[in-house]
Amino acid sequence: MAANYPTRIILAFRSGGVCAFPECGKHLTYDAKEGEDTYVAEAAHIRGEKPGAARYDPSMTDAERDNVRNLIYLCTDHHTIIDKVEADWPTTKLEELKEVHESRVRTAMEEAFADVAFPELQNAVSWVTNQVPVADGSFDLTAPEEKIKKNELSNGSRHIIAAGLTSRNTVSEYVEAEAQLDADFPERLKAGFLEEYYAKRKQGHKGDELFELMCVFAQRGLQRQADRTAGIAVLVYLFEICDVFEK
């Protein structure tokens, strides 16, 4: 077995699309001219994928081996190193490396919310002009805490939402400003996220997995940290103000 595509996408999101090996810093995303970007990193197993593999743990199930918690985002060279020089890279060291890297990425994203402004938001939602407005949605306010509980989101997702809400007024002002130029803009914006949300729900995703896949959707095609964070700020705004994550 191997990690499935959604799991790899979530791993890339948590890793900021960057190799987790110390001082590597290699960006591992190919920017496609059309369609979705391609992640060229490897979802390396911390505890080996099969018997004979580095750090293999026979007590684990296949599902546990391919879970995002047992995977670390690496370039090809550093994946080879941790498996070929196993003595230098035991399980505990790789788990610590993964935690430090993903925590650093999460902190950088949360701090970037303070810099979200109209230019970043404009870059983050440039696709909206081609979106058909939703016909029967609503922008009824539902408390974020209620949605968090309803969707059984963990503290990790909760922290992203809390950080994103610090940009809520800026996003709201931006949406209002765009609505002055295009009355359908709020509904176009909502329609794009709802379309992706329902597609992911239909595929069986839920909870943190669904939330993180929606974060990836919000960041698609964006390279600058400020733009990527602006995309998530928009998602969090919709999380609070309309029925994204409502049903």
Image (spheres, helix red, strand yellow):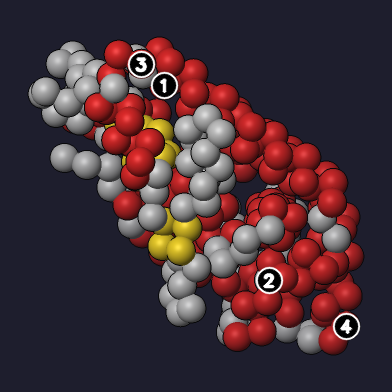
Q: Earlier in the sequence, mark 4 or mark 1?
A: 1
Please state which amino acid type lies under the numbered disc 2.
Answer: Val
Residue of label 4: 180
Q: Nearer the viewer, mark 4 or mark 1?
A: 1
Q: Residues within 10 Å of mark 3 (few under 14, many from 20)?
A: few
Q: Nearer the viewer, mark 2 or mark 4?
A: 2
Label 2: state its secondary structure: loop
Q: Nearer the viewer, mark 1 or mark 2?
A: 1
Please state which amino acid type lies under the numbered disc 3.
Answer: Asp
Q: In the rendered view, does 90 fall on the left or right side of 121?
A: left
Contact check, label 2 and label 4, Cβ < 8 Å: no
Please state which amino acid type lies under the numbered disc 4.
Answer: Gln
Query: Residue 161 sits in which quadrant?
Result: top right
Near-viewer residue (172 or 61):
61
Q: Earlier in the sequence, mark 2 or mark 4?
A: 2
Residue of label 2: 125
Q: Nearer the viewer, mark 3 or mark 2?
A: 3
Q: Nearer the viewer, mark 4 or mark 3?
A: 3
Residue of label 1: 94
Q: Nearer the viewer, mark 3 or mark 1?
A: 3
Label 3: state its secondary structure: helix
Residue of label 3: 88
Q: Residue at x 66, y 39 (%)?
A: 160
Q: Residues within 10 Å of mark 2 (few under 14, many from 20)?
A: some
Contact check, label 4 and label 3, Cβ < 8 Å: no
Give residue 104's position: percent from left, percent from top.
Answer: 64, 32
Label 1: state its secondary structure: helix
Q: Is residue 159 visible?
A: yes
Q: Residue at x 85, y 46 (%)?
A: 114
Q: Residue at x 20, y 16 (%)?
A: 57
